[in-house]
Amino acid sequence: MSETNNKNEGRMEAIVSLCKRRGFIFPGSEIYGGLAGTYDYGPLGVALKKNIQASWYKKFVEDRDDIFPIDAAILMNPKAWEASGHVSGFSDPLVECVKCHNRFRADHIEIIDGVQHCPNDNGILGASRQFNMMFKTQIGATEDPTSITYLRPETAGGMFVNFKNVIDSLHPKLPFGLAQTGKAFRNEIAPRDFVFRMREFEQMEIEYFCHESKWEEVFESLRTDFNSWLISLGLSKELIHEVEIGEKDRAFYSKRTIDFEFDFPIGQKELAGLAYRTDYDLTQHSEFSKTDLSYFDEESKERFIPHCIEPSIGVERAFLAVLSSAYKEEVVGEETRTVLSFVPSIAPIQIAVLPLSKKEELSIPAKEIVKTLKKIARVQYDETQSIGKRYRRQDEIGTPYCVTVDFDTLTDKAVTVRDRDTMLQERVKIVDLDNYLLEKLS
Ligand code: ATP
């Protein structure tokens, strides 16, 4: 067995094509010609996305005692976006081609001899201007400036505005964090690279609050926890790069930022960010809302505005990193097989049960096995086409184990379990099957 297309050439195209062919991700509104910057998840994509989110939730919320979930509304009072600085400053530099009038993000285009050229027709690009990326919308039936609000460009805001609600209801002691997953919207000037840069996407964010004196130790522990979570998704260590962001490239309120960059097929790019946001957000929201967002420490009798560290990641970038790590083409004999080598915990389907024939004498016991295995795993039953084709199909959607029910099963009460990665097969008694697979999947 040897590997073929695991280099970057054509890899992104191969992944995009597999996503469509097997029902992971489709272009948004495709039958109407699409809508730039939007994608829709298909059945397997939904499963993979949910499993990635569940693994984040387990690691950072369920397995800890100090991080609590929030699920705030997407629409917020517009004053919250004034307070956070998004109304005045959430913008990217935009340039327009004087010939074709296509628009681009100025910081994505090389400057040659002091001039930027249009990637479309090589025309000269005009002077850059700031373009606010928030989607405006209108609340209620009247169309006047007071009815304007925005689709949230990040989930963080909902956690800052609920800081006091959590303190007053749960009474957590500092340090503690709030965690939220949900949709975010950015009117990106140039959405591109599949789901890497979209206009509607999902984020998984944590706002972790502490006393100013503790920010460095919190930052360090979130950094290592975040890194180990990325590795638990099956991302190889060597492909993750922690990049220290220099002062001039950091947001003005951040005193330290690390980007977790990843070797995507499109190059080394930001997968996630970890930022020390100081007390900027709670201070701003205190001022704009005229609500005291300070914290009183019973032990030290000190009242202060907590400082905040934020690990933030886009679900789709995590999804793309997982897919591009897992995607392999291998030459097996005369054929090439495509495999998604997902770690079992996030694989959309963990076990496929395949009767060798559609005949009832095999399909009935196979369906019984499905019923039992569904208690321990995500299971799919498949009886169509030849067994070889079914193995290839399961390899391509990343199913770690296939259980084949054949005519010998009727007498020896055993099935064949095939391992996706090694393709080795083992005969296992049906009575032992759930324990055997449970161990393999853990
Ligand atoms: P970039 O520099 O790539 O535009 P950013 O620094 O603006 O990203 P943040 O504001 O830090 O991104 O957002 C946190 C995370 O949300 C990012 O690390 C990324 O995973 C994700 N994200 C941001 N913008 C997009 C987008 N347009 N499409 C998909 N994911 C995104």
Image (spheres, rainbow, N blue to C red):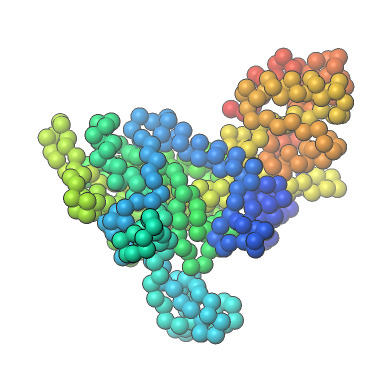
Ligand 1 in which quarter: bottom left
Q: Residue at x 77, y 46 (%)?
A: 337
Return the residue found at the far front.
141
258 or 61, nearer to the observer: 61
226 to the left or right of 436: left
Residue 220, quarter of picture: top left
- Residue 79 at x, y percent in the picture: 28, 56
* Residue 406 visible here: yes
422, above or below 361, in the image: below
95 to the left or right of 35: left
Quadrant containing the N terminus is top right
Q: Residue at x 81, y 33 (%)?
A: 383
322 to the left or right of 83: right
Return the residue found at the far left.
301
Quadrant containing the C terminus is top right
Q: Residue at x 34, y 40 (%)?
A: 178
Across the whole image, how many numbered discs are drawn on residues? 0
- Residue 56 at x, y percent in the picture: 47, 38
226, above or below 186, in the image: above
* Residue 247 visible here: no
- Residue 285 at x, y percent in the picture: 24, 51
104, above or below 178, in the image: below
38 or 369, nearer to the observer: 38
- Residue 89 at x, y percent in the picture: 33, 65
251, above or below 126, in the image: above
Q: Residue at x 83, y 15 (%)?
A: 412
213 or 285, nearer to the observer: 285
